[in-house]
Image: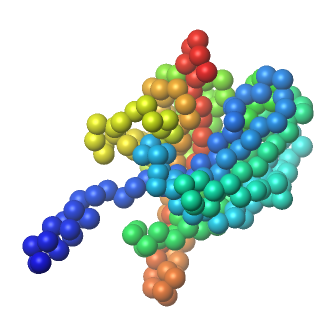
């Protein structure tokens, strides 16, 4: 029995923590003729295709346009995924220009890591393929400012961004990168599930997307000290997430 318990303990210690990603994925990154876009909000592990975590109703969702920030929280509808709570909303883009769609989720308690996770996630949808307004910021506590237009990108393009906390660059920030696996790729081992890169002294990072589909960039920084549900000291992880789509030449 002791041998079995020791083996299970060693296995647990050797297993890396799963990378949590707050998805905010639109039905398209570019709307050549405008119109409606459906946006899915799921808290999951994209490369491994799960497990999905229960996501309570977000604090807010919104859109940043040339007119400012618009609150879209009232448009949320529950849309469970794999039996877990997830959310969806529709947005009608009637004018040319990019819209920065974002979500501020409620803190998620992760007992395995003794911390709360709050991932502020965003994605850009370009109305009428305008190519304008893609670099607007949502003013989130932590956020990635894109240095490359995040729409209309080919597979293999280099995405670059700056990690910001309270509007200031975060030197040496760690960024986790995952691809939304459609089932066509089986990672050869756990090292390939989550790519990890570090920002430079100016908070700038870059990554070349090797496959078509949605890529999530999660810059993780320490948040304020917290108290666990059982009253013990705990940590807070703040994530600045940005989703970018790569498209193969000659196909969607």
Instruction: Say if 249 sits above or below 234 in the image.
Output: above
- Rendering quarter of residue 210: top left
Q: Position of residue 193 (x, y in %)?
A: 37, 43
Name of the residue lying farthest toward the top? 250
As drawn, the residue found furthest toward the front would be: 83
| Relative image position of residue 88 (x, y in whole percent) | 72, 51
Residue 118 in sight from this viewpoint: no
Does residue 177 sit above or below 105 in this rendering?
Answer: above
- Quadrant of the drawing holding the C terminus: top right
Residue in view at x 89 percent, y 31 percent: 95
**Which residue: 43% across, 73% down?**
111
Residue 241: percent from the left, percent from the top? 58, 48
Quadrant position of the N terminus in the picture: bottom left
Percent x, y of residue 13 = 25, 64
- Frontmost residue, 52 versus 62: 52
Counting labels gives 0
Q: Is residue 52 left or right of residue 31?
A: left
Query: Relative to residue 136, is residue 213 drawn left or right?
Result: left
Whether residue 224 is visible: yes
Compared with 89, 96 (above or below) is above
Residue toward you, 235 or 43: 43
140 with respect to 235 (left or right)? right
- For this orientation, the residue located farthest to the bottom is 231
What residue appears at the point 59 percent right and 53 percent down from the top-left corner? 81
Colour setup of the view:
rainbow
Is 210 in front, or is 39?
Answer: 39
Residue drawn at x 46%, y 77% is: 234
In the rendered image of this protein, does residue 224 appear above or below residue 242?
Answer: below
Q: Taking 234 as reference, is 167 left or right?
A: right
């Amino acid at each position: 029995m002791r041998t079995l318990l020791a083996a299970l303990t060693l296995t647990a210690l050797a297993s890396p923590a799963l990378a949590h990603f707050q998805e905010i994925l639109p039905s398209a990154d570019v709307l050549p003729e405008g119109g409606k876009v459906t946006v899915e909000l799921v808290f999951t592990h994209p490369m491994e295709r799960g497990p999905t975590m229960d996501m309570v109703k977000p604090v807010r969702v919104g859109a940043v346009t040339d007119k400012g920030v618009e609150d879209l929280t009232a448009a949320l509808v529950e849309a469970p995924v794999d039996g877990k709570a997830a959310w969806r909303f529709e947005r009608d883009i009637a004018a040319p220009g990019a819209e920065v769609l974002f979500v501020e989720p409620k803190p998620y308690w992760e007992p395995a890591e003794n911390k709360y996770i709050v991932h502020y996630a965003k994605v850009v949808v370009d109305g009428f393929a305008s190519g304008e307004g893609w670099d607007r910021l949502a003013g989130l506590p932590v956020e990635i400012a894109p240095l490359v237009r995040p729409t209309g990108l080919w597979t293999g393009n280099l995405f670059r961004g700056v990690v910001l906390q309270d509007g200031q660059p975060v030197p040496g920030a760690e960024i986790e990168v995952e691809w939304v696996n459609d089932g066509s790729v089986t990672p050869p081992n756990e090292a390939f599930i989550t790519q990890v890169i570090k920002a430079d002294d100016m908070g700038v990072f870059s990554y070349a997307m090797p496959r078509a589909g949605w890529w999530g960039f999660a810059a993780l920084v320490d948040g304020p000290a917290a108290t666990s549900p059982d009253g013990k000291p705990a940590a807070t992880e703040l994530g600045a997430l940005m989703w970018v789509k790569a498209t193969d030449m000659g196909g969607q």
